[in-house]
Amino acid sequence: MDSDKLYRFTAPFPHEEDVSEDPQTSPSYEKLLSFRVVVSTCSEAGILQDLDVPVGHFSHIFIDQAAQAEEPLVMVPIMTFSDAYTNIILAGDPHQLGPVIKSPTATSSGLGKSYFERLMLMRNIYGPANTHVRKT
């Protein structure tokens, strides 16, 4: 398989020609490192750790639906594979679905908000004070 192909851990029935043929079986270490893009859920990123993928191997870690993911879950790929040169991209809308936290202890400990939303609140980069209006 060419190194410019995509490997997806979660696709049970791939239909695209650029997706690996057998997404349910983990590839060998060498084959895995040859893929340019690896798609995984946050929890399944632990599989990559089991395969000894080195920290910093990925230049980018993109977390889709980050506003919905619990903070400990988002930390699996971030803390396991990023280094100072890894770009972390969080995408999502905190005004849609948030994380589903069933534990009152977790909620009272601050895990009722996603990591994405907590970062947005800490940085206050999307508040009304930061809205730029162009005057005509």
Image (cartoon, rainbow, N blue to C red):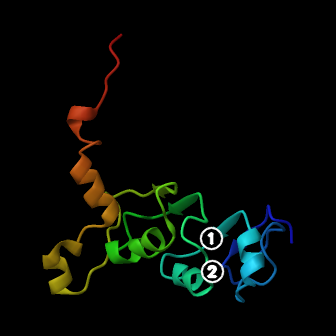
Q: Amino acid at mark 1?
A: Val
> Distance of mark 2 from mark 1, alpha carbons?
8 Å
Q: Earlier in the sequence, mark 2 or mark 1?
A: 2
- Snapshot quadrant of residue 52: bottom right
Q: Nearer the viewer, mark 2 or mark 1?
A: 1
Q: What is the number of the mark on residue 39?
A: 1
Q: Amino acid at mark 2?
A: Thr
Crowdedness of circle 1 by 10 Å Cα count: few (<14), some, many (20+)?
some
Crowdedness of circle 2 by 10 Å Cα count: few (<14), some, many (20+)?
few
Q: What is the number of the mark on residue 123?
A: none
Residue drawn 45% across and 64% down?
65
The quadrant in which the N terminus is found is: bottom right
Q: Which x, y percent locates residue 9?
A: 65, 80
Mark 2, residue position: 10
The quadrant in which the C terminus is found is: top left
Q: Which x, y percent locates residue 87?
A: 51, 54
Q: Along the horizontal axis of the image, is 80 left or right of 50?
A: left
Q: Secondary structure at mark 2?
A: loop
- Snapshot quadrant of residue 71: bottom left
Residue drawn 31% across and 78% down?
100
State yes or no: discs 2 and 1 in contact (Cβ < 8 Å).
Answer: yes
Q: Which x, y percent locates residue 58?
A: 60, 63
Q: Along the horizontal axis of the image, is 15 left or right of 114?
A: right
Residue drawn 22% across and 36% down?
128
Q: Secondary structure at mark 1?
A: strand
Residue drawn 15% across and 85% down?
105
Q: Which x, y percent locates residue 18?
A: 81, 66
Q: Along the horizontal axis of the image, is 4 left or right of 65?
A: right
Vertical position of residue 129 compared to residue 67: above or below: above
